[in-house]
């Protein structure tokens, strides 16, 4: 997941263009969402309206990344592993290059289908990267039907790299970032996305855009929010990753370091902001921007390792982090918490 791909599917605060006839781009303008959402026939969660817990788990992907493989493999082999543990799992599929009001509504429709299909009162949504923003959006629209939202490396407070790439941050790093961006991305996304698409996506991930998003979609009292981050570049990031209630399946890795994927290396330098004293990050997202709801700490993983990419490879450097185990533990954690 190549930087642009990693940032693809990124939410935007802009309503979809009127008259755009592309598939599934006819989402309502933001101010209409509340009314339109009510008409989805989502019945309130009551004892008779659905079963559970434990609730089905919806996996919400973030960046695009693997168009030739498809989002089914985005959380590499996670669905199968969770199902083997007895969980009901739905893999959501959203447009790779689109904003929250489109992607979020796509996720909403799939959550709705999952509720009908499973008969569950609620679902839990695990979102990686931008998928976590889509998940929060859905939770805001149908809070009675969402149990927990779990986000992994979601830039809730803004993606510094988006600020840099859109010239929001002064300094020479702009040019460097652009060069890195192009060097890393071109082989992968050149045939997939136009620069304008990527730029629009980046726009939605800026610090300013997410500040507006967070105001518009505050947490719902009836939904529980958990967040994790990845830390890489062989940084233990003890201070930035400190989480008072981090579960054992996170703290077990406290002394393990992750080498950042070579494809993310140059980007990680920009994301860290400082060469001498870099801010903890997973190669793409700063740890400090990922904390939302109950903060559960960092795992040693770069932005790709977090979902077992590429194609189930090892995190590298003898790092014992295993993404399959991580998601199995998250699912079990949710069950233990009553979700
Ligand atoms: Ca990897
Ligand atoms: Ca790694």
Image (cartoon, grey):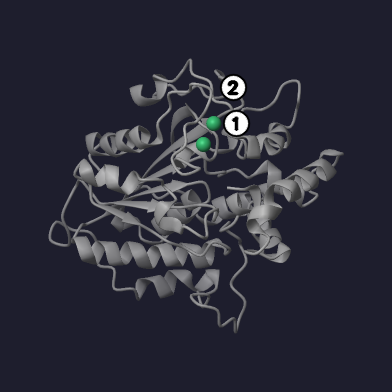
Q: Position of residue 28 (x, y in %)?
A: 51, 75
Q: Residue at x 69, y 48 (%)?
A: 162
- State which quarter of the image contains the C terminus: top left
Pointer 2 or 1: first along the chain: 2
* In front of the other: 125 or 79: 79
Q: Is residue 130 above or below residue 270?
A: below
Neighbour tally class for label 1: few under 14, some 14-19, many 20 plus, Cα within 10 Å: many
* In front of the other: 216 or 146: 146
219 displayed left or right of 235? left
Q: Position of residue 161 (x, y in %)?
A: 70, 44
Q: Which residue is the site of mark 2?
A: 234
Answer whether labels 2 and 1 touch (C-beta < 8 Å). Answer: yes
Name the residue at the right extreme. 172
Q: Is residue 231 above or below residue 169?
A: above
Q: Position of residue 237 (x, y in %)?
A: 57, 21
Q: Is residue 209 above or below residue 322?
A: below
Q: Residue at x 23, y 66 (%)?
A: 116
How many angstroms separate mark 2 from mark 1 (CA)?
A: 7 Å
Q: Secondary structure at mark 1?
A: loop
Neighbour tally class for label 2: few under 14, some 14-19, many 20 plus, Cα within 10 Å: some
66 displayed left or right of 114? right
Q: Which residue is the site of mark 1?
A: 260
Does label 1 point to a residue whose CB lies under 8 Å from ligand 2? yes
Q: Residue 112 falls in which quadrant of the image?
A: bottom left
């Amino acid at each position: 997941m190549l930087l642009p791909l990693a940032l693809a599917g990124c939410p935007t605060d802009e309503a979809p263009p009127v008259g755009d006839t592309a598939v599934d781009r006819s989402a309502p303008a933001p101010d209409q969402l509340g009314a339109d959402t009510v008409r989805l026939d989502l019945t309130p969660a009551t004892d008779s309206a659905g079963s559970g817990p434990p609730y089905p788990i919806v996996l919400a992907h973030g960046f695009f990344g693997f168009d030739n493989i498809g989002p089914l493999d985005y959380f590499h082999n996670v669905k199968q592993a969770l199902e083997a543990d007895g969980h009901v799992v739905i893999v959501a599929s959203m447009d790779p290059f689109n904003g929250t009001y489109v992607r979020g509504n796509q996720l909403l429709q799939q959550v709705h289908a999952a509720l009908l299909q499973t008969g569950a009162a609620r679902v839990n949504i695990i979102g990686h990267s931008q998928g976590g923003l889509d998940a929060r959006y859905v939770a805001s629209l149908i809070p009675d039907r969402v149990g927990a939202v779990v986000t992994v490396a979601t830039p809730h407070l803004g993606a510094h790299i988006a600020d840099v790439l859109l010239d929001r941050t002064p300094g020479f790093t702009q040019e460097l970032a652009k060069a890195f961006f192009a060097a890393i991305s071109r082989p992968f996304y050149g045939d997939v996305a136009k620069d304008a698409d990527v730029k629009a996506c980046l726009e939605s991930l800026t610090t300013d855009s997410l500040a507006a998003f967070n105001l518009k979609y505050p947490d719902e009292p009836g939904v529980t929010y958990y967040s994790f981050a990845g830390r890489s570049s062989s940084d233990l990031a003890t201070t930035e990753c400190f989480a008072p209630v981090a579960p054992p399946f996170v703290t077990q890795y406290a002394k393990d370091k992750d080498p950042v994927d070579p494809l993310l290396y140059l980007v990680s330098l920009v994301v860290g902001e400082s060469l001498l004293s870099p801010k903890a990050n997973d190669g793409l997202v700063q740890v400090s921007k990922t904390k939302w709801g109950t903060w559960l700490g960092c795992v040693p993983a770069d932005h790709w390792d977090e979902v077992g990419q590429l194609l189930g490879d090892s995190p590298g450097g003898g790092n014992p982090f295993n993404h399959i185990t991580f998601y199995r533990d998250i699912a079990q954690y949710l069950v233990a918490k009553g979700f």
